[in-house]
Amino acid sequence: MVDVTTEALQTVKSALATFQSDIDGLSMRATNNADDITEECKNHIKQTKAEIVQVEAQIAALNKQIAGMEAKIEQATSQYSTFLTKIPQLENNIHSLNSRISALNSQIASLRSQLANTEDDNERQQIQEQINVLSRQVSQCETERSQLESELQNSEQKKAELQQTINSAKSQKSQCESELSVQKNRCNKMKDKLERLNTTFSRVEGDLNAYVEATKKFEGNSLDKVKHNTTAIEKCVESIEQYLSTSL
């Protein structure tokens, strides 16, 4: 019966030693786990912040592009308006020159008719001089008309190019504004996510700290009890051994 009791006490002592081995370092392991979780949370927050910075950079770039498109549209529109005024003026000038040339040609035709019906040499010479003067005026008018027609053609081509520039810039601006709306919405969502992450992290950090403190307290109390119980068992075993060694 005494041997059974001693054996049982040794079994309990062994179990306590195993329990002590399991408990020993529990708070350290809990601390390490808590640190790993905390670091993972911080990494998520850091990554979200980096993504927000990246999106905000995209938003700034889009705003810059839109401003550039608006300046381009404004400049092209101003130049376009200039040609809207200039082209009718050129057309009017060409029309006036055509009328002038027609009138001069009529005068020349009339003078040539007179020349054909005049036999007096002095009169013929005067008529021919008038024809020559009018012919030079016609030539000058035709040269001026040619220059104006060339300028008109260039102006109309430039006007068409400006219209294309305006349309293209407006299209690009519209695309940028659409993308800007997407990125602003994305940025707002990410900022909301960051706020939730920070709130959650604060709560998790508090819970982890409480968990670590609880494991430290549990480890300390458990080890104290194991030590106390182990000492008690050792004393019991020692008393039994002394009893067995005592001669009755």
Image (tube, grey):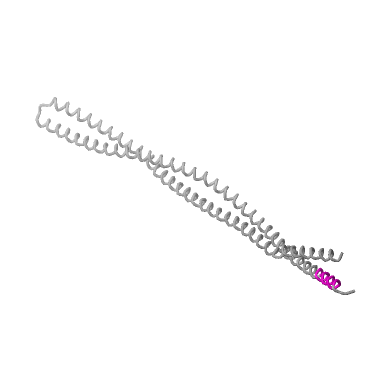
- Residue furthest out toward the top: 117
Q: Is residue 162 left or right of residue 59?
A: left
Above/below status of 16 relative to 44:
below
**Extreme residue toward the front, this view:** 247
Is 238 or 220 nearer to us in this picture?
A: 238
Image quadrant of residue 161? top left
Residue extending furthest left? 121
Q: Magenta stretch mostly in which secondary structure?
A: helix
Residue 241 point in image, percent of width and height? 83, 71
Nearer to me, 117 or 239: 239
**Nearest the camera: 158 or 9?**
9
Left or right, 239 with reference to 188: right
Residue 113 found in image quarter: top left
Answer left or right for 149 relative to 109: right
Count of residue discs:
0
Point out the residue furthest to the bottom here: 247
Q: Which residues are magenta?
A: 232-244
Looking at the image, residue 99 lies above or below residue 25: above
Confirm whether the magenta stretch covers residue 242: yes
Rendering coords of residue 28 (x, y %):
68, 64
**Which residue shows up at 43% across the image and 47% down it?**
72
Percent position (x, y) of residue 54?
A: 53, 53
Horizontal and vertical percent position of residue 150: 29, 38
The residue depicted at 69 percent of the width and 65 percent of the height is 25
Which of the 4 image quadrants contains residue 125?
top left
Placement of the C terminus among the 4 image quadrants: bottom right
Which quarter of the rendering shows the N terminus?
Answer: bottom right
- Whether 20 is among the magenta residues is no
Horizontally, residue 102 falls left or right of residue 88, namely left
